[in-house]
Amino acid sequence: MPTQQFSAPGQAVEEAKAGGHHAHGTHNYPDPLTHIDRTSWDVTIVGAGPAGLMLATSLARFGGFDVLVIDERSEPTTAGRADGIQPRTIEVLRNMEPLGSEFYDRSAPSFERTFWDPRSDGQRGIERTRRVQSFPTDMEIQDNCTLGLQQGLIEGGFLRDMERHGQRVTRPWAYQDFEMTDDATYPVKVTLEKMKPVTESTNEGGAPISIIKPTGETKTIRTKYLVGCDGGRSKLRKTLEERHEFTFNGDWVDTLWAALDCVVETNFPDVRKIAAIHSKNHGALYIFPRENNEKGEPIIRCYTQVNRLGGEKSKESALDARDKVTAEMVMKAIQEIAHPYHFDFKGVEWFTCYPIGQRLISRYSLPAGNTANGVSFPGHRVLLAGDACHTHSPKAGQGMNTAIIDSQALAWRINLVEKGLADPDTLLGTYHDERHATGKQLIDFDSEYSALFSGEVPKNTPEVATMTDAEKREHFINIQRRNAAFTTGAGVLYADNVLNHRDPSQKLGVSKITDKLEPGRRLQPAWATRWSNSQPVRMIHEIQFTAPGGFRLYVCAGDLSKNMRHLEAFAKHLASPHSFVNRFRANQRALLLQHKAYHQLPTSLNTGLGEGFASEANPFFHMLLIVKSQRFDIEIEQIQHLGALKSMLYCDDIEAGHGAFKVTLDDQFVGGLHSKWGLENGGIVVVRPDGYVGAIAPIDQGQSGFEAVEKYFDGFLTHRPIAGGQRTRL
């Protein structure tokens, strides 16, 4: 196998850009690559939808990887498909700026949901029965809304972000087959096939379909990792089912739905809100506001039940009927369901028809095993993400969001393993454990939600059949309320494993010191003042999801006058060659990044301050020192002897929502972050690269607290000896 050179950012783009494309006047994206002229790759990604592009752009941001992203289509999505971005996903993308701001500014945000039901007086038609805020404010989501944005625009944003970091998609190439080999470096052998340009056609009902035919040209490559992001009909998943005992488990709901993207003129008052509409006899309708089209006209997505057009459920199976539905039938169904309100359809951008299926793959990664000739191969080198793992109804707006978080979860793990910091079996094994459990929760929720929305009785709650109509309406709303934490993404909870220690006494040797932060859960957002420029900042966004892709340690210092000796002890510990900062060092690959450890320095480090006030001892462990004090009462000279702790200084002296960011001469807002996190006396909050809390250790209990942090990282990181006991920097 020939030796391959790693590509620095900017070097991966091998073909001249032809100026980009503008499809329908709203999409712009760089030209794809068309040739595969290398035989070995670090990561091969099959599928350039949101899951594949999120994984690709994350790896491009981390840098130092040779990534091949293939897609069988000759161009990105230009209409239809997924279109809802939930609050936690927005938060993740705002941690990948400018992606988050680009998506938010282009989209249609929905802050409210309304519920419409049959008229209470028995007359034909519907009436609004409830209006609610989209999501509870106690989750403290910055953007407390759902964004309506067409998948093509989302793909375009990812593609531009990839290009900013020197990476493009290769088209049109399709996955054909893979086999595991005894190659120690590139164990996965993959066969790819060149495809002809996509041609668009329609099915019997006129819904658009894509026809993609092979050219007969094939290519075989080797790769360290093969990741299937190729959707609900994943070919890679089918290979795993046929040869490696994977199963894709689930069932169909025999209800037929259509998705229609349209421009309307209507007297329906909630057309720019998310509206769930249930008629008495003609089924259900779900209106979802979308971005403006190229003419500046507001689009809406209408999810419409179309198997009750005659006033009762059709006896034809949803699978048999789906290709016969026309856009005119969908529009007629909307008029019937929404009566007495009228919809004048000015234009149809896209439509499709589908039955609802809930299915979940048995495993997200291929365990270690043996090749056909008996040679063992490592585990977690073939993996799945997104709809290749889970399929369900689109109405709860979870598919693309779950796919994006799947890819985020996989990207940072691959990055730490390939940078020489993490044990591959241990860390990559947690990808299946955490994301499969989330996928199971998604399928269970969607099975109940989609059945209720369609007027069916969920299989797991047969008691719904005995409810009155009023009780069913209340039950439907309660289902949404009860699952709000999950559907926003902000309440997704990971079980205890090597990454999450709810009870630190069991394996870390210290007692629990707060109930306000929970390992395995997203870090609760809080505000502080960045000392270097006195700017109020949301602490969860101070370190972006980009190179180097390390851990964040929020060191809550408490009162400096009381805790200085504890901080000095921690700084002394960190300076020791036996500390995690010096034991866990990245390999040579991290030195190949264009700007060393970072593509772009965080603002908190990009200050021009010398003498260690803006440089990290190890950039894979970001130390954010938060002092319970007014910014006016702190000088950096007070912390100049704190070594690795002094690079990023913050003052806990503001409180969002109570005269937010208001400068006061008293201590009215001092300590808000410490109090919110339950760390009045200080503490060390270890946060994973994906923003989830991993462990919390005391800072005032001497060496036992510091050793707890060491034990945490020892659980999954890999010690690389440094020659002569010398400490090095990236």
Image (cartoon, rainbow, N blue to C red):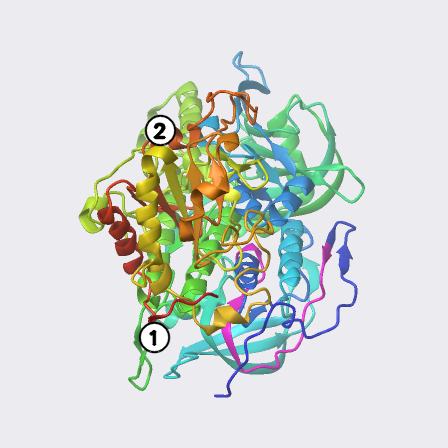
Judge the density around disc 2: few (<14), some (14-19), many (≥20) Cα neighbours within 10 Å.
few
Asked if residue 627 is positioned above or below residue 495 in the image, the reply reads above
- Residue 105 vs residue 504, the one in the foreground: 504
Whether residue 65 can be seen here: no
CB atoms of marks 1 and 2 within 8 Å: no
Residue annotated with mark 1: 724
Element type at mark 2: helix
Residue at the image point whose x is 81% and y is 41% from the top:
295
Inspect the image, locate mark 2, and give the three-letter code of the amino acid beneath it: Ala
Answer whether residue 46 is magenta in the image.
yes
The magenta stretch is 28-51
Q: Earlier in the sequence, mark 1 or mark 2?
A: 2
Whether residue 479 can be seen here: yes
- Residue 89 vs residue 211, the one in the foreground: 89
Inspect the image, locate mark 1, and give the three-letter code of the amino acid beneath it: Gly
Q: Is residue 157 left or right of residue 717?
A: right
